[in-house]
Amino acid sequence: MPRINLLPWRDELRKQRQRNFTIAAAAAVVVGIAVVLVSRMALGNMIEHQNDRNELLKTEIAGLDKQITEILGLENQKERLLARMEIIERLQQSRPEIVHLFDEIARTLPDGVYLDSVLQTGRKLEIGGAAESSTRVSTYMRNIDASEWLTDPGLIRVETVAGEQGRNAEFTVTAKQVGEGTGEEEEAE
């Protein structure tokens, strides 16, 4: 005789499928939540790590900016020291020139000419004095022009005045000093 199953097997199968679906859905939700949490934690760690790297870079950049400022200060100080050294070197080179200058002023001075003042500005000289006549002033200017250490004489003024010993010509003459270190850079000055 055939066996007939009168139990509601379809209902049980349906309930079994419903339970399996619920378990699978719950597992999918749990796995999804776990994936979201893990990914959030991973992204949070990555962001935190990047922020740490950014802070490190900021501190390093600040340190490098400070070093750059120090380097620029040192370069400025170096330039000032080099300028001072150059000035000292030029002064050392021009030291004997003053001796030559006074010697040349004395050598170019003709008889009958007396000097009252010598004013030097850079390489330019302004010489003031008195002479017995204006021809002696012109002789003095020719002597300056022929000089080895003085050049480019120029007459600013000649004035004849009556003095205790007769008539004198008071004069002011300009000249330029020629030295061992004269060159294009001194002409530019």
Image (cartoon, helix red, strand yellow):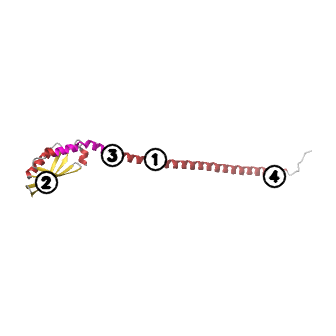
First along the sequence among labels 4 and 2: 4
First along the sequence among labels 4 and 3: 4
Q: For the residue carrying disc 4, how many other residues have a C-alpha within 10 Å: few (<14), some (14-19), or many (20+)?
A: few
Indicate the amino acid at tag 1: Gln
**Residue named by callout 1:** 67
Indicate the amino acid at tag 2: Phe
**Mark identifier at residue 15:** 4
Camera-side mark, 1 or 3: 3
Looking at this view, is 156 or 56 the one in front? 156
Q: Residue at x 76, y 52 (%)?
A: 22
Helix, strand or loop for disc 1: helix
Q: Residue at x 33, y 44 (%)?
A: 85
In 3D space, how far apart are the residues under numbered discs 1 and 3 (Cα atoms)? 25 Å
Evaluate if marks 1 and 4 touch, with contact meaning CB atoms under 8 Å apart: no
In 3D space, how far apart are the residues under numbered discs 4 and 3 (Cα atoms)? 102 Å
**Mark identifier at residue 171:** 2
Q: Residue at x 64, y 49 (%)?
A: 41
**Residue 98 shown in magenta:** yes
Indicate the amino acid at tag 4: Lys
Camera-side mark, 2 or 3: 2
Residue stretch rendered in magenta on the structure: 83-105
Camera-side mark, 1 or 2: 2
Helix, strand or loop for disc 3: helix
Q: Residue at x 47, y 47 (%)?
A: 64
